[in-house]
């Protein structure tokens, strides 16, 4: 073989080796790309921070499996014991009106303590043993036992609860660091998005179900005075799922499962979950201070009817129209007036009055916020420094005293049961000005107000909201509750 042949052979060998190496590299890159595409891009993020949704594609054939494997260690099963005091079960006739009328009520009625057990779910939210769950699971518990995915049991202590959002944080002292969940942005959730629910329905811990997001911004699910902005899902949720996570296909928590609509007591395809953005805000506040301090604007608002306001484009805007402005409140000081339509809060569009209320509630008192309003068809930005709930309560009390000549409070649980009323509705009168509208109409201390002009009164705040549209000197029909007899009836009252 001459030198020319050898040179040609060497060149051929080098070319073949180079080509083989390139093929191997290409194959490796292709396999890695395919693996990344089929893997759920789930991983640790900042604790109790909202994470952006990844843009990587998701393989639905394996996504739920991956989400379940990586999230189950962060979901806990909670056993709850509550103790309550009940009347003597052996003397049921004590509540009989006939017995009370002829024999009176014994001065000393023996009472008994009764233990009630329940179950719920929760999710680990940091490495310190803090766990997020529902307020209705943990708030009144006298004992909580938290079971981790490895089967270990730990005593739980309440850090703080917020019944207004049905959220609570409890804490355990584990021997090792725990894996926290990752939170996604509930504002970016879309109807039709696939979701996974994990929890302990009917005490069956580590249960995984799947479905889609069926609806957004649902209200009327819990008490009317609560802060409501529920996501609706058809992922099967049953008693025991409460407090567990609802996750997207990237393994991010987008909500805390809280309630179901059912006539049978079990899953019927309609479940409700508290959005993650609300949950993160509340959890942080409860961990830091054990309570929630909410901002206050000092306005009474309502949804905007399409025929009332235009923004120059020919389209009715979303937003919330101001019906009344509290004297001396943050809104009045900032120059807001009746008829203004709030269409954005710190640059985020306001869809309706409930949306505005929720966003204000997630703002600390003393925070400067920017409200985008429509006034006379023109947009403008107005900065407002939020007040506190204490300011709101004082303003509310002054307003109601001025208009009705009385002071009010919410009904207690005992009163709800005594008068057989719906929880969250009605108010009790705590003081009456004899010369005021209520006093002149014959109302007394401890009487109740259940409705105004055929509209139910949803607590003290609801009473003020109904009166906001009533003009001075206007007569309204009040559904009154007589504290002596427990009877109800309608009485005309002239509002100041």
Image (tube, rainbow, N blue to C red):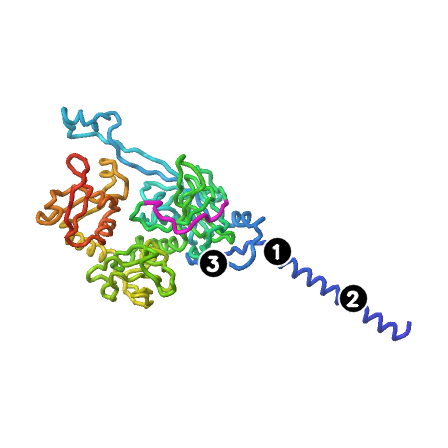
> Judging from the image, what secondary structure is the residue with disc 1 in?
helix
Q: CA distance from mark 3 to mark 1?
A: 21 Å
Q: Residue at 38% across / 49% down in the picture?
A: 218
Comes first in the chain, label 1 or label 2 = 2
Residue 369 lies left or right of residue 205; in this view the side is: left
* Any part of residue 287 in sight: no
> Judging from the image, what secondary structure is the residue with disc 3 in?
loop
Q: Is residue 61 above or below residue 325?
A: above
Q: CA distance from mark 1 to mark 2?
A: 29 Å
Is there a contact, CB below 8 Å, between mark 1 and mark 2?
A: no
Q: Quadrant of residue 314?
A: bottom left
* Any part of residue 48 in sight: yes
Residue 459, percent across and down? 24, 47
The residue labelled by disc 1 is 35
Residue lying at the far bottom of the rendered structure:
3
Residue 484 lies left or right of residue 72; in this view the side is: left
Residue 26 lies left or right of residue 221; in this view the side is: right
Question: Which residue is at the front of the view, 383 or 49?
Answer: 383
The residue stretch that appears in magenta:
210-222
Residue 141, percent across and down? 33, 41
Q: Which mark is residue 45?
A: 3
Residue 317, percent across and down? 36, 60
Comes first in the chain, label 3 or label 1 = 1
Comes first in the chain, label 3 or label 2 = 2
Q: Which mark is residue 16?
A: 2
């Amino acid at each position: 073989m001459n030198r020319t042949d050898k040179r040609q052979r060497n060149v051929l060998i080098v070319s073949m080796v180079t080509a083989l190496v390139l093929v191997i590299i290409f194959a490796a890159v292709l396999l890695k790309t395919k693996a990344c595409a089929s893997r759920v891009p789930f991983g640790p993020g900042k604790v109790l921070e909202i994470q952006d949704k990844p843009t990587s594609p998701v393989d639905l054939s394996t996504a739920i499996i991956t989400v379940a494997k990586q999230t189950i260690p962060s979901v806990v099963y909670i056993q709850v014991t509550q103790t309550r005091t009940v009347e003597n079960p052996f003397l049921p006739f004590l509540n009989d009106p006939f017995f009370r009328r002829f024999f009176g009520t014994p001065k000393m009625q023996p009472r008994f303590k009764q233990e009630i057990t329940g179950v719920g779910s929760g999710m680990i939210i940091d490495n310190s043993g803090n766990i997020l769950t529902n307020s209705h699971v943990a708030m009144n518990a006298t004992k909580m036992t938290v079971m981790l995915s490895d089967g270990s049991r730990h005593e739980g202590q309440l850090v703080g609860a917020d019944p207004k959002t049905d959220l609570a944080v409890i804490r355990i002292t584990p021997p090792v660091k725990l894996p926290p969940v990752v939170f996604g942005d509930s504002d970016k959730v879309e109807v039709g998005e696939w979701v996974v629910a994990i929890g302990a329905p009917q005490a069956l811990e580590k249960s995984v179900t799947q479905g889609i997001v069926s609806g957004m911004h649902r209200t009327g699910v819990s008490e009317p005075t609560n802060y409501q902005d529920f996501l609706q899902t058809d992922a099967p949720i049953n008693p025991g799922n409460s407090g567990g996570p609802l996750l997207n296909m990237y393994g991010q928590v987008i909500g805390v499962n809280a309630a179901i609509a059912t006539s049978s007591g079990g899953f019927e395809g309609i479940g409700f979950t508290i959005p993650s953005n609300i949950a993160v805000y509340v959890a942080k506040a409860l961990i830091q201070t054990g309570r929630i301090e909410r901002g206050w604007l000092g306005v009474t608002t309502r949804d905007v009817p399409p025929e009332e306001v235009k923004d120059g484009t020919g389209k009715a805007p979303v937003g919330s129209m101001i019906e009344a402005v509290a004297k001396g409140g943050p809104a009045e000081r900032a120059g807001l007036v009746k008829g203004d339509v709030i269409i954005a809060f710190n640059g985020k569009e306001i869809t309706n009055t409930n949306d505005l209320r929720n966003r204000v509630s997630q703002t600390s008192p003393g925070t400067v916020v920017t409200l985008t309003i429509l006034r006379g068809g023109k947009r403008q930005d107005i900065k407002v420094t939020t007040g506190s709930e204490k300011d709101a309560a004082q303003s509310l009390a002054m307003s109601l005293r001025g208009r009705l000549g009385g002071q009010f409070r919410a009904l207690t649980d005992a009163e709800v049961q005594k008068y057989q009323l719906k929880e969250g509705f009605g108010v009790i009168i705590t003081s009456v000005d004899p010369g005021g509208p209520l006093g002149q109409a014959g109302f007394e201390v401890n009487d109740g107000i259940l409705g105004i002009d055929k509209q139910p009164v949803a607590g003290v705040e609801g009473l003020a909201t109904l009166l906001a549209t009533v003009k001075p000197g206007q007569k309204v029909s009040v559904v009154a509750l007589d504290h002596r007899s427990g009877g109800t009836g309608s009485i005309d009252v002239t509002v100041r």
